[in-house]
Every structure is written in C-alpha cells, then in structure tokens.
C-alpha cells in the first residue's frame, strides 16, 4: 500500500495499532500487530499467508546491518534444509526459556550445529554455512520457522526467500533470473508433467544451473518427483550448494541428485533425458558469437537418442546473420547434424535484470521422427507478448512438430513459424534463422482471405462519407466561425465554485467500480479517467445492468448532457450527450441547471473548463495546483452562451463527418498495407475518376 492509504486507515479505524516510536519523524509500528490487524479487518489486499511471509521477510531484510546478503540466504537455506533432513523444528523456545537472551542464543546455535554435524557428515548441504557464522545468527532460526509457518513447508519458505533476493541486496543472484512467463513457456515445451504421468522415469540436466531457477520451475510443474533424477553443474561453488539445497527441498532424494562444481557436466551419475539450460550471459562488448555456439555444441554432445534439450542464449549467435566464417561453419554443422528441432526468436525483456538483452531459444532432439528429418521449425515471436495464449499456441507448434513432424493429413500448420529444409539454410551460409515468410496458417486464415471484401467495404464507406460531407457543405456552405474581436469591456470572471454555489451547476460524485465487473458487452458505458483523457475509447468498458443493480445499489446514472471530468492524471472533460452511463471514480460529474437565471450549456461549460488557465500539474506534484472549484471562467451573457453553443455544435457535426472519412480511409489503407506486406495481395492498376 502507498503511505496515504495507511494514513487513511489510522484516521478512520480507531483500532489500528498505535505507533511504538518515531524515527526521523516517521512512526514505527509493531509488525505483528499490524499484520494481525490487516488479517482481522480484511484490508490487507493479500492472503494471510502472504502477509505473514512479508512480515518474516521484512524481519530478515532488517538484519542486513548485521549480516551480509550472502550470509542471510546461505544460512537461512541451510537451516531450512536442516529442518527437512532432521524432521524437527529449529527453535525450541521452551528448552532455553530460563536462560538470558545471549546464553539462550548460544545454546540454540550449539544445538543446531550438533544436529548438522550428525546429519550432514559429508557437508553436502548445511554444515559449512552453519559453521561459518556464530550464535548471533540464532534469530534467523526463529525467522525461518515463521517463514515455514506462512508457506506451509520448507520448500515454499525457501522459494519465497529466493524470490526476495533483490530485496536482500543480492542483485548478482537475481541477474540471470528469467521472467515467469518465459519459465512457463520452457515448462510447456518440455512436456515434463505429461511424460511423468505416463509412468516414465526421467533425468533432468542443466550444465549452467546458476541458482537452479529453471530446474525449480520444471519441478514445480509436477508432483511425480519420485521418478525424477537431476544433474546440474556450475563453476561457482556457492551457487551449486544453493541449487543442491533447492532440489532437496523440492522433493528430490539425496541419492537422485548430483550437483557438480565445475565448467562441465559429467555424466557419471545417469544419462540425461531432458536438458534445460541458459547459456552464461556476457555483455555485448565482450560477447563472442563463437563462444556461445561452442557452448551450444557442448549441450548437443549430451544428447542421446530420444533426449531433448532447450537452450536459451543470445539472439545474435542463435538467430541473427553471422559475419564470422568460423561461427557460420559451426552453426551450419549443428544444423546438418539433424538435431536442431526449432529455432525461436523471443521477445525482449524476458530477462528483467537485462531489458536490452535479445534472447533466443533452440530446441534440440537426438533422433527426430522421420517426417521431421532434414527440416527445422523457425519461429519468431519477438514482437509478441508472452501471454498465456501465445505460450500455448507456440508450445503446441513445437510439441506437434516434435511428435509427428510435418502433418500433411489434416493440414495443420504452425501458428508462429515456418518449416524450412536444412539444405536451404545451408545454402544461405550464415544467413539469419528467421521464418522466410508469414506462417501458412496466417496466410490462409479467414482474416486474410476476406481482405479484398473488407477493403471494398471500407472504400464504399469512404464514398458514402464523402458524399454526406459534400451534401452537408452544399446545404450549409463552407465553415465560418463568424467570430469577431471584442470591443469594450471584457466579460466578468467567475469560478466553478461560484457556479456551484449559485446552483447554476451541480457537482455529483463518481463511484468506485471493481475492475473484475467490467466487460466489453455490458449494458451501461463506464466513464473513468482513461476514457475522459482519451487514453481508452469510450465504450470499451461496460457493466451489466443486473450486476449494477445488485452490487452497486447507490450508483446513479448520468443524464444526457452531463459533463464528466477528471483531474487525475491530468485534466480531462467529456460531454456525455447520450447519458445512462456510470462514472467511475476519480472521475466526477457536473450537471448544468437549465432553469438558472443565467444558464450555461454543457458544451460551453466543457469548453471553458478545458481552456481554463493553471490546470496543468507539475510532474513532481502529488496533487493538482488548485481545486477545480477555483478554476476561473468568463461569465458570458446568455445570448453569447447560445451563439457559442451553436458554434460548438456545428464544429462537432463537421468533425463527425470528417472523422468518418478518415476512419474509412485508414481502414482501407491498413488492410491494403497488411496484405501487400505478407504477400497475399498484389497492387492492380490505379483507378482514376474523371469528375467534371
């Protein structure tokens, strides 16, 4: 929550916990009291388990002045592993309740060390980390118990801790993390859950494991971990121990995991069935295309018949055109080896710590199905967002290609790529590995085949709109505003506040509408800040009238001619000519009183408010420079108001006519350009019309 929300809670709820002290003018509260209050009141905007885990994580972050971030992550991970291996709680407060705090901490830590020495004799998981720190770390054992209580088990507690690695200050540990959407895509491409449900026993491998994020994501997608063996390697000993603890807490038995320290993955334990890895990141100035392809070749050596590998790496090595002859030869050799299943250009930003990094993905299979031999699926989703729909369709393309190859019986074509013979790629030596044309499914889709008819409809609308505009101009003549320079005294000034006080204008509030109740096909238009400022089309958000009547009993609809305004994020004014709309807070309503002594019209009021001086907001300001009631407006005479309103109405009518022409022309142009760009349309002879 933002600070103003908390201030509101303290003001409105007398039972909100009292501040314990102040630090530099900032009140400090007891975290447990605040968490309990949020859970009891239901205002926490999160589940009770999330609130309690946040409280524990906050306590861990607060210890950064006593321990380094590495010490916090390593010690807490070791304590969680010790608890799972031993099957006993870490902190037994009753055992040392009679001792002073310092002696109790020393006794607790000595007991934990004895347990670690007994359980982890070979120092595979916990012993080294616990020996490297003294009894001052005893509070971490209690915080670990709090995390476990919130997450229900040791694994959930450890994953919450690693998810907060950036908050702890371990940016180096978070630098290689991929976005959740990409992790989900990699999980779908492996098809691990289905293979395990079919009774297979699989060996997973990652030769560049780092902190084990990809392996943990795969294991998170299945409950059949008793049939999984895991191999991993990384040159950093600290990271291999984190990965080892992470896999153990994920449910992999001690005898079924082998995490090695070093640059190469030694297959002395088992042969991998599935390899998922991310090539080590190198800055663009130091990145070597040849080195990335060499690492890719090492992964290919791990493949035995039936094994699949997913390799995430830099797009300039895996997809882009290669300038180096040696690199081009190596990539061509990998393609000719008949192990490359698909090459996918991914969108940028899927590595949040490195938003400028362009990634790509290769999937490899040793011994593909006969229908896929000598061919590669090239896909490009670099301009897409990894939404659930995009991930599902891309995974279906790759999995169908892996299982059946080119399907000629039912005519299934990939939605995001093209199947290209390796021979064609070999002839284009070093060329880019991108689809040579749009997917066949896109070219033969109904949207594409109907383009000529849609273009003809847009052209017909353009002709009708042009004829309507010409007829209107013939009837009314050319546009003339008929405005003159004012001579004499300027009109008096007033403010919106005075108009409201004089009952010439009535101000009505907006309503708080839950976003989950908004649809595109409801009965009532919803007008919020986005619609008023033009950031969203009017009518894009609607609400069902039955839902409005049951869930929002006090909501009143607008009347025709109501002026809807907002001050956040900037001033916006809109005249609702049709009415019967719902105004969503922070937008509000101004209703003109037609029976006043000096009446205004909605168009005039909206125009004058939009042109008022001093309505802009400084970028650093939290609130507008002045309230809308202080906006100054000219107090026009009634006959001037009527003439001004007629002028505004005339401009609106002409704008609608011109907008109809512009929209039809833009639609025809968009469809034509799209068809010529994907090759499904060809330009014909230009048509000329001789008008006399």
Image: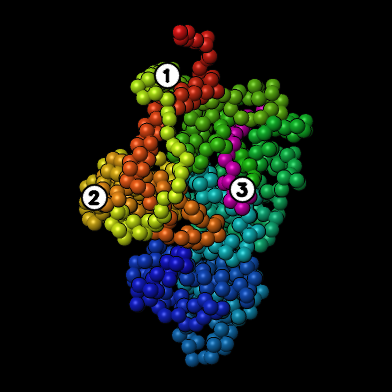
Does residue 347 appear in this view? yes
**CB atoms of marks 1 and 3 within 8 Å:** no
Give me the C-alpha separation between circle 1 and circle 2: 47 Å
Residue occupying image coordinates x 36% and y 69%: 39
Q: Is residue 185 left or right of residue 320?
A: left
**In this view of the protein, which residue sits in the foreground, 109 or 28?**
28
Cα distance, mark 3 to mark 2? 59 Å
Q: How many marks?
A: 3
- Residue 270 appears in the rendering: no
x then y, percent, for residue 229: 54, 51
The residue carrying mark 3 is 355
| Mark-to-mark CA distance, 1 and 3 | 42 Å
Residue placed under numbered mark 2 in the picture: 595
What residue range appears in magenta?
A: 336-354
- Location of the N terminus (image quadrant): bottom left
Which residue in the protein does label 1 denote? 459
Earlier in the chain: of badge 1 and badge 3, it is 3
Q: Earlier in the sequence, mark 3 or mark 2?
A: 3
Residue 654's place in the image compared with 573, above or below, is: above
């Amino acid at each position: 929550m933002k600070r103003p929300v908390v201030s509101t809670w303290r003001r409105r709820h007398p039972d909100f916990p009292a501040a314990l002290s102040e630090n530099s003018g900032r009140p400090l509260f007891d975290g447990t009291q605040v968490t309990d209050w949020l859970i009891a009141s239901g205002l926490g905007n999160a589940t009770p388990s999330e609130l309690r885990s946040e409280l524990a994580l906050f306590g861990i972050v607060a210890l950064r002045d006593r321990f380094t971030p590495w010490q916090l992550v390593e010690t807490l991970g070791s304590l969680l592993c010790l608890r799972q291996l031993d099957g006993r709680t870490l902190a037994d407060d009753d055992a040392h309740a009679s001792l002073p705090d310092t002696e109790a901490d020393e006794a607790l830590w000595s007991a934990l060390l004895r347990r670690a020495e007994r359980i982890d004799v070979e120092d595979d998981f916990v012993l080294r980390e616990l020996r490297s720190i003294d009894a001052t770390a005893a509070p971490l054992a209690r915080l670990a118990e709090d995390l476990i209580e919130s997450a229900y088990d040791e694994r959930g507690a450890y994953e919450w801790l690693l998810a907060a690695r950036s908050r702890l200050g371990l940016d180096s540990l978070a630098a290689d993390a991929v976005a959740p959407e990409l992790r989900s895509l990699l999980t779908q491409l492996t098809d691990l859950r289905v293979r395990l449900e079919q009774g297979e026993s699989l060996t997973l491998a990652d030769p560049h494991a780092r902190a084990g994020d990809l392996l943990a994501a795969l294991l998170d997608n299945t409950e059949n971990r008793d049939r999984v063996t895991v191999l991993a390697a990384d040159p950093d000993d600290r990271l291999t121990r984190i990965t080892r603890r992470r896999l153990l807490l994920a449910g992999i038995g001690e005898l079924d995991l082998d995490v090695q320290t070093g640059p190469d993955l030694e297959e002395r334990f088992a042969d991998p069935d599935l390899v998922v890895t991310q090539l080590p990141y190198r800055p663009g100035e130091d990145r070597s295309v040849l080195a990335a392809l060499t690492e890719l070749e090492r992964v290919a050596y791990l493949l035995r018949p039936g094994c699949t590998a997913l390799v995430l790496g830099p797009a300039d090595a895996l997809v882009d055109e290669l300038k180096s002859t040696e690199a081009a030869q190596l990539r061509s050799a990998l393609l000719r080896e008949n192990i490359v299943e698909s090459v996918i250009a991914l969108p940028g930003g899927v590595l949040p710590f490195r938003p400028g990094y362009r990634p790509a993905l290769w999937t490899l299979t040793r011994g593909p199905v006969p229908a896929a031999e000598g061919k590669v699926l090239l896909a490009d989703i670099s301009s897409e967002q990894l939404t659930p729909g995009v991930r599902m369709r891309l995974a279906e393309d790759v999995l169908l290609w892996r299982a059946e190859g080119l399907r000629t019986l039912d005519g299934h074509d990939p939605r995001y790529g093209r199947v290209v013979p390796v021979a064609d790629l070999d002839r284009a030596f070093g060329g880019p590995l991108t689809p040579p044309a749009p997917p066949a499914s896109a070219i033969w889709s109904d949207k594409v085949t109907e383009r000529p008819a849609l273009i003809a409809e847009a052209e017909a609308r353009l002709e009708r709109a042009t004829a309507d505009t010409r007829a209107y101009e013939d009837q009314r003549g050319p546009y003339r505003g008929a405005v003159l320079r004012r001579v004499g005294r300027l009109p008096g000034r007033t403010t919106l506040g005075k108009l409201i006080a004089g009952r010439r204008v009535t101000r009505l509030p907006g309503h708080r509408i839950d976003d989950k109740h908004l649809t595109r096909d409801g009965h009532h238009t919803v007008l919020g800040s986005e619609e008023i400022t033009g950031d969203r089309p009017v009518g894009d958000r609607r609400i069902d009238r039955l839902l409005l009547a049951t869930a929002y009993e006090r909501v009143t609809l607008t009347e025709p001619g109501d002026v809807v305004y907002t001050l956040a994020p900037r001033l916006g004014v809109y005249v609702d000519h049709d009415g019967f709309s719902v105004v969503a807070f922070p937008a509000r309503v101004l209703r003109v009183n037609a029976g006043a002594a000096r009446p205004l019209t909605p168009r005039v009021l909206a125009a004058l408010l939009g042109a008022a001086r001093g309505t802009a907001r400084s970028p650093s300001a939290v609130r507008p420079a002045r309230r809308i009631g202080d906006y100054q407006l000219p107090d026009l005479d009634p006959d001037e108001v009527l003439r001004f309103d007629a002028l505004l109405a005339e401009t609106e009518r002409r704008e609608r006519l011109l907008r109809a022409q512009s929209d039809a022309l833009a639609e025809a142009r968009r469809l034509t350009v799209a068809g010529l760009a994907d090759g499904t349309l060809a330009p014909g002879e230009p048509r000329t019309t001789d008008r006399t």
